[in-house]
Amino acid sequence: MGNRFKGLNGADVDFETTWKVLETAFKEIHTKNASALSFEELYRNAYKIVLKKKGEELYNNVAQFEANWLSGEVRNRVVKQLTAPLLLLTDGTGRSLATSAERRVAGESFLRALKESWEDHQVCMGMLTDVLMYMDRVYCTDHRQPSIFAKAMGLFRDQILRSPVRPESPDLIEVLTSIVLDQIQMHRDGERINSHLIKSNVYMLEGLYESDQEVEDAKLYLRLFEPYFLQTSAMFYREEGERLLKESDAGTYCKEAKRRIEEESDRCRSTLSESTTVKIQRVVEDELIRHKMKGLIEMDSGVQYMVDNDKLYELGLVFELEARVDARKTELTKAMQKIINEMGTEINNAAINTSQAPPTAPSAQDEHGDDRQKPGGTRQINQQTVAALKWVENVLALKTRFDNIWKTAFASDQTVHTALERSMGEIINAFSRGSEYISLFIDENMKKGIRDKTEAEIDATLEQAITTVRYLQDKDIFETYYKKHLCKRLLLKKSQSIDVEKQMISRMKLELGNSFTLKLEAMFKDMTLSEELTSGYRKHVAQLGDADPKRVDLSVSVLTSMTWPLEAFRGASEDEREGRSNIIFAASIERIKAGFEQFYSKKHSGRKLTWQTNMGDADVKAHFPRSKNGRPMTHDINCSTYAMLILLLFNSLPSTTSLTLEEIQAKTNIPENDLKRNLQSLAVAPKTRFLVKEPMSREINAGDRFSYNENFSSKIIKIKVGVVSAGNKVEGDRERKETEKKNNDSRGFAIEAAVVRIMKQRKSLPHAQLLTETISQLSTQFKPDVNMIKKKIESLIEREYLERIEEAAVPSYKYLA
Amino acid sequence: MASISPERHSPTEPPSKDKATQMSQKDLSNGISSLLGDTEYSDLTIMCGQHKFRVHKAVVCPRSEFFRTARKKGSFKEGELGVINLQASSVGSSDVIDSDDPDAVRLMLVYLYKQDYTVVCMDTDDFATGCDDAQAIAASAGTFNASDRILTTHAKVFAVAEKYGIRSLKALAHHYFAQQTNPTPEDLAEAIKVIFTTTPEHVRELRDIVIKYILTQQSPAILEHPNIEAAIQSVDTLAYELLKKSQGAGSYGGIRSQDSCSHICSRCARKMSKPTRNSCLGDCTFCGADAWLTFKS
């Protein structure tokens, strides 16, 4: 036709003719008959129209064509699939009228029809876009029109999705939404659905926008589908959560919740859109976890039950669930802390009860009292020991139990760990005798517990001990007790292995620092030096050539006075200390004592030796004429130094002569309490009754008379005389007060030292900061009392170490050099 | 001296990155050029009138959306057949509104391989070997005296470049066109027709050159040449554009700053009722004419 338009003019183009060519072709394209069409021809025609400035007409014609096609052909095809089972869906009553199988089949037909229409539309519009390439490039760009493809997509939205199914009824997209939601509900109820079909429809909704501007967040999926999906899901899970809480136990609940969350993620992947994953998870988490966590934890079958019954897997589920909604796992942590607290309090109360229980009939597990017939007081102390051991074991068991839960169920989570540790610390520190009991636990293990253990087991025990120590706030009190117990173990040679003792010390060093173990190490050093000293003295005596067989052998422990808590041995009052130095020794003993003092002062001049007679013990050979079935026999008696001195008195007396209590005291100068206790051991205890007491009674009273027991008999050759005061068990109340007082004093020194150290370095410092720094410096040893720090500052000011800075804005101090 | 000067043994300087890049670009373009006329790897045929060009999708399609789309499988006939048939205008005709000049198509394809084209020396056609119909080439070369119609040929190449969406070729044709400073009136007349009928009005490049050329001729002889006169008359907007231009009231590139201008319909002389957004003024709301006189206010 080109030749007819010689006088070329835009208006001359036979637009209608050209358009007819295109329109016919478009129809072919829409009916899938395009393979016979020539692209070149169509392109050329479209190009020509645009060339002649008819781009706008072309654009509008195409849009009109598409609108007609969609509303005429496509919509009918889709609406036809809205069969009876689907029609009542949208008003919410449809559920009951058709079985889900019917609805599903009908729904799938509808979804398939819509999906196919959409896909056809896309393919066809792709081809039209190709043909109209030049129009898009020139007309649409210049006139800021959406591309014809975008325009046609919008037409699909308006003509198909946003038009009512029939007059007065909801838009197709609402029907689509309710069908998809219905199918999803079927899937949640366990039916199989064709997720691929739904996914295709979701693709469509994701590819369409509310307006032709194609703003990213105005996708139909986001505007018209997702909100309803989330809303119905929230409703569903709210109900399901409540039902589950009522009908099942917590473990099942967790499993169900976890399954549901995973299921919803899967659904987003396979059926809906990945972009919904986070949102729907949030919904499920809100409904099944966040709003229900407290109820879940507090269920009868909740966390308490799980802990009680070691339901680690279920605990793990609870943890996993809460971790989803709360990085700090507040509810679970709270519940766990409460449980630890309750269990810990129980342990603490049990320990208090055991320690305060009235002495019961000799219990079966009384392992300490086999060779000692103790008076009531002793038994109570023993009970304390049992309580202490039990307490530490229980605490450790608790710790192990919760550690296990933490590791297995709580994925070794750091936040939870911190909370659990804090609770452990709280219950250990809530128990006023914690420090003492822990030290006692170590003491017991050092003396007995590790006897038959392998190295690994010993290691584990030490580790356990350190574990508990780690929690202690008042480490200084622990140090005091530990020193006391260690002192007794060393001096009385009760320790199973010095090696293990040293291992323990090095562990403490690692855990609590150098200063903590300084004095403890000094004690070991003293012991080593003393051994050398003793053997040195033996050699010295041998060199003297005095081969007197009756000469008393001596072994000495020289203890540095500040290092050793010697009051541990002194279970008595102050006045006894004065008496001790004036003990009257038998001549044979006195000689040796003098000999050693001489030897020692030659070695270390200027040192003063004080004899701790209350701490020593002696091996004595004693003859009893009728001991072995009426025949004489010699026994090796091990007894305290005081008992030895008492027994020696009777050596020089005729066997029938007796001595009164007062006479014995006068001859030995042994403090009264010690004397009475030793006499109790020697004259009352049946197995070691070497003396006869007159009158025979339990108590030692003034005027009692004692004499050599000629009729003593025993099958045992080696006899150990138990001494009451040597019982290294839990403190009595008075001792405790004393310990506390001493402890407070030493804390006072520590505080003063810290304050001075800080001030010396800083020169001047505000009050509040000085407090904080002092507390932080001392925190490894104990938790200082603020009032005490204030008092100590006052006292330092009085002693002119510090002075107040008068003109300072905040109360401040200055260091006085 | 016995010592050997170090320069003699120093290794040759490694080439700079730029040089290496240059070399590889040259290799690449040589490689592509060498494919011109190749039939061994050819996988697409483009027909235009008597011409049949055996080309390579890999060369042609990336440069032109038209060709890329045309050979897509599964939509149109061309994709199935592997042949694209471009409607050819009758030989030597300048009426190419509905069709393509085979020579312009040929130059376009040559350009796609060589990044350049030349109008003269048509006989040494690069496609000669690739042509199934050598006669057609010979015929076109014979009747088409290229050296007479250089301006027209560039205009035609420009037109196909516009139509098939090859921007770089448009630029090149524009360049060549602008270089022709002294065309014959016949050539100019022909070119005018080509320019004003085969490219859309908004494509200003060649239009502006022509208008400026006519207006800057000192002697009025050019307007009196019968071919020129016929050409100007055949393109109805051209007369007005020349008029506007000669009064200094318009600009080459259309009126962009609407605020300072008023538009008078060139047919009914009524003032435009409302300003339009774009350079396109649209039709007169009174008489439907689409030609305007623009005055600076």
Image (cartoon, coloured by chain):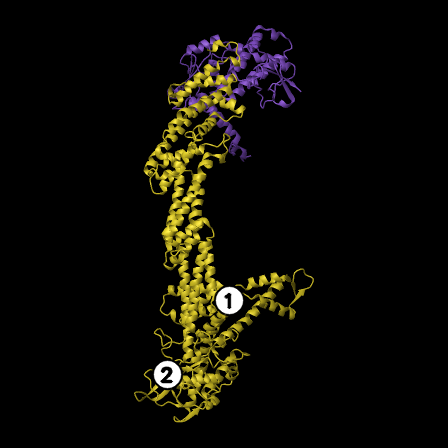
Chain colours: A yellow, B purple
Ranked by sequence position, the earlier of labels 2 and 1 is 1
In the rendered image, which residue does mark 2 sit on?
A: A636
Pointer 2 with pointer 1, Cβ within 8 A: no
Q: Is residue A770 left or right of residue A514?
A: right
Crowd tier of the residue under label 2, counting other residues whose Cα lies within 10 Å: few below 14, some 14–19, many 20 or above: some
Which chain's residue wears label 2?
A
Q: CA distance from mark 2 to mark 1?
A: 45 Å
Q: Between tags 2 and 1, which lies in front?
A: 1
Which residue has dot 1 on it?
A474
Q: Residue furthest left?
A: A629
Query: Can you give x and y, in whole percent of width and height, for residue B120 in the image?
Result: 51, 13
* Image quarter of residue A131: top left
Q: In the depicted view, which residue is nearer to us: A664 or A375?
A: A375
Residue A339 position, x and y percent, is: 43, 60
Is A118 placed left or right of A764 in the picture? left
| Three-letter amino acid code of the residue under disc 2 | Asp
Question: In front here: A250 or A756?
Answer: A250
Q: Position of residue A386 (x, y in %)?
A: 40, 72
